[in-house]
Amino acid sequence: MAPDAANSTSSKGLVSASTAYKIAAANLIAGISGTAIAALIKNTLASGFAAGYILGVINIFWLMRIVRKGINLEAEKAGRLVARSYYVRFAATALIFAYIISKGWFSPLPLLLGLTGSIFTTVGVMIFVAVEEAS
């Protein structure tokens, strides 16, 4: 392998690790802030929001892992892996949400707000990283 190719591969790994750290840091800050705001609004909302946010972050990092695996495969194999893994991830998330709600541990609204908050935070970080890399 040429030295330039090796450096480009290793720097891509660093970029993805750097992006993952930025996503984790932003989600930590947003999750704590959102939980605090939910606690100020109504104390019972805070734990449900935090649980939904944690599930959302786990879901996002699971998705990132799927993407990383898919990038290293041939197109046909990658398509099958990503599609299958996506449905498994979605089903697992839905089952966990259904289980938590059916047990009455948390109400659906704070769980969904937490999940949505983690998704919006991650999308925002990804936009910021893309703009940063473009300039």
Image: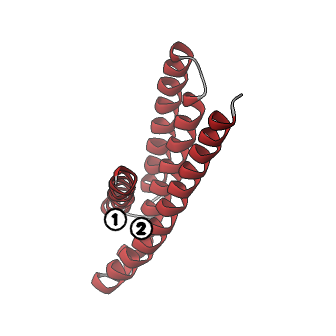
Horizontal and vertical percent position of residue 83:
47, 24
Q: Is residue 119 above or below residue 12?
A: below
Disc 1 secondary structure class: helix
State the residue at coordinates (60%, 32%).
69
Instruction: Estimate the x, y position of residue 10 in percent, counting from the top left.
Output: 65, 44
Task: Name the residue beneath numbered marker 2.
Answer: 48
Q: What kind of element bears circle 2? A: helix
The coloring applied to the image is secondary structure
> What residue did someone put label 1 on?
110
Image position, residue 129 (x, y; %): 39, 56
Distance in Å between CA atoms under marks 1 and 2: 5 Å
The quadrant where residue 42 appears: bottom left
What x and y, as percent, mark residue 23? Answer: 47, 60
Q: Amino acid at mark 1?
A: Pro
Quarter occupied by the N terminus: top right
In the image, what residue occupies the spot 43% across and 62% down? 53
Q: Name the residue at the bottom extreme.
A: 40
Q: The C terminus appears in which quarter of the rendering? A: bottom left
Q: Amino acid at mark 2?
A: Gly
- Mark nearer the N terminus (1 vs 2): 2
Q: Residue at x 49, y 48 (%)?
A: 59
Q: Is residue 116 left or right of residue 28?
A: left
Work out which residue is located at the far top of the displayed protein and give it: 76
Contact, mark 1 vs mark 2 (Cβ under 8 Å): yes
Would you call the spot at circle 2 few (<14 residues within 10 Å), some (14-19), or many (20 or more)? many
